[in-house]
Image: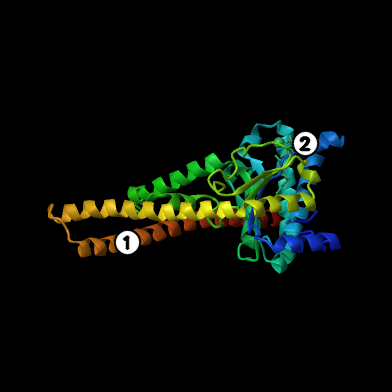
Amino acid sequence: MSWIKEGELSLLEKFSANVLKAGPMPKHVAFIMDGNRRFAVKKQMERQEGHMQGFNKLAETLRWCKHLDIPEVTVYAFSIENFKRPKDEVDGLMELARQKFEKLLEERENLEKHGVCIRVLGDLNMLPLDLQQLIAKAVLTTSSHNKCFLNVCFAYTSRYEITNAVREMAWGVEQGLIKASDVSEALLSECLYTSNSPDPDLLIRTSGEVRLSDFLLWQTSYSCLVFQSVLWPEYSFWNLCEAILQYQINHKSIQKARDLHQEQQALHQLEADRVCVAELLQHHGNGKPADDQKRQEALQHYAACREERIQNFLEALKHKRDSYFDDLSNDAILAEEGSEK
Ligand code: FPP
Ligand code: MG
């Protein structure tokens, strides 16, 4: 099964999609695709077959999202916790990922036609080296596409991601790129694996479990959370419509909470800048009080310098991440050339 499943919606599905699209639609939907093993038990099939059907359902869901004008999807494909599962299951999931990322490379023209950009979020170092290299090649292949985005969280947990972001900021301070006082909620968000995406509007978990299992904890503070009892491989277009309807019912209160949070963040930043500027003026003015105009000018200057520091730091961070992917992909090409000789 390919990553892209072609095909139109049925007439009834099309009609329902249009009715939904008359209301506010989520632009980014995240899925915890849970219930593959229970599905396998229910259908008396091998566990690995349950995971394979789980992948097929992902491809089908992406097709529905495309028809519903949802340009971004993020999925929990492999948690760091999943490494604790029996070895044969972990090996099976790694093999499935190998097959699917190889398929992705074969399908590059189709992905380009549809403008699909596939990103992998997580700590690739935890994966077998050949899979790391394959993922790096696949990610680089689609990195310039910009019509729709699929973020595959693989070797991912949210706490690990947040810890990593804090480490990146500590690195920035150590390198003298940013000051400790530049650390803020906004900067931490920029250091997460998800920095290129807006926060999800809607998060869906299947299989009846009602917890987040360390998935996108930071990013879903203002998302609509929908828990559905259906097992992931049995997920249907109608299940997705039902979840979107939940989002639409709650849209106003979510938007209000988001706006309020943004306003508060702006005020916090202003207050933090004021404290830094007051200290600087005190230091440079030998304790003499500064007048209002001088304080205002100093505040603007300080905010502009902070913004410049942060931009330089984020560029350095991007360079570090891009080089990691480039190096992995180049190593893979060299290894291939070596084996052909
Ligand atoms: C959760 O069901 C599912 C997983 C741990 C794996 C999800 C992976 C896929 C759907 C394939 C995606 C692959 C790629 C390459 C994107 P579970 O195993 O926890 O099932 P259970 O809850 O019934 O025990
Ligand atoms: Mg599960």
Q: Residue at x 16, y 56 (%)?
A: 284
Q: Is residue 320 visible?
A: no
Q: Is residue 203 visible?
A: yes
Other residues around mark 1 within 10 Å, as few (<14) / some (14–19) / many (≥20) = few
Q: Quadrant of residue 214?
A: top right
In the rendered image, the residue lying farthest to the right is: 44
Quarter of the image with the C terminus in it: bottom right
Judged left or right of residue 268, residue 73 is right
Mark drawn on residue 37: 2
The amino acid at mark 1 is: Cys
Residue 160 location, x and y as percent?
53, 40
Instruction: Tell me which numbered mark, 1 or 2, is placed earlier along the sequence.
Output: 2
Rounded to the nearest whole Å, what is the CA distance between mark 1 and mark 2?
A: 53 Å
For mark 1, what is the residue? 305
Judged left or right of residue 43, residue 75 is left
Q: Does the Cβ of the disc 2 residue fall within 8 Å of ligand 1?
A: yes
In the rendered image, the residue lying farthest to the bottom is: 113
The amino acid at mark 2 is: Arg
Q: Secondary structure at mark 1?
A: helix
